[in-house]
Image: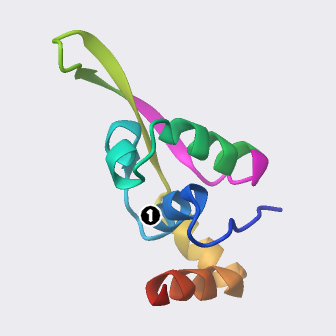
Amino acid sequence: MYKLPKIGTHKAQLLIQLLNGNVVRNSKAKNDLDSANPATAMSQLRLDDNWNEYIERKSIPSKSSTGHDVYVKEYYMDAATIMKLKANDPRIEKYLDQHRKS
């Protein structure tokens, strides 16, 4: 069973974005979270908090600021997964409400 991370943590911020249907990219999350390595928080959310089966991920080809070919990790939850989670676990909506109030 997955764990809901403590509100206010980087893991919580990522999970809330995903549960709201947003796509999270490592490159953008770096600024959003004010973290040097958002990939660590995402990895902890997926593996330590057991969200891996719900979070989809893919690599998107891109260019670095120096013009090199790179891949950017993109994470998301599809709408059906989000609806199923909300329908089966009342804690999800409460968790999102807590974030809206904080």
* Residue that carries the numbered disc 1 in the rendered image: 17
Under tag 1, what secondary structure?
helix
68 sits to left or right of 6: left
Whether residue 52 is visible to the viewer of this picture, yes or no, is: no
Question: Measuring 63% from the left and 40% from the top, which residue is drawn there?
Answer: 43
Compared to residue 93, the image places residue 21 above or below, namely above
Number of other residues with Cα within 10 Å of mark 1, as a class: few under 14, some 14 to 19, many 20 or more: some
Task: Answer left or right for 37 relative to 74.
Answer: right
Q: Is 57 in the magenta?
A: yes
The residue shown at (23%, 19%) is 64
Q: Position of residue 52 (x, y in %)?
A: 68, 47
The quadrant in which residue 72 appears is top left
Residue 85: percent from left, percent from top? 64, 73
Against 46, is 18 above or below?
A: below
The residue at the far top in this view is 68
Q: Is residue 95 visible?
A: yes
Residue 70 locus on image (x, y percent) = 32, 16
Image spot of residue 98 (x, y percent):
56, 86
Question: Callout 1, which amino acid?
Answer: Gln
Residue, x 64% and y 83% (percent of image)? Answer: 87
For residue 28, which quarter of the picture?
top left
Horizontally, is 58 left or right of 91 in the view?
Answer: left
Q: Left of 71 or right of it: where is 6?
A: right
Q: Which range is magenta?
A: 48-59
Instruction: Residue 10: say if magenta.
Output: no
Vertical arrangement, residue 79 with respect to residue 76, above or below: below
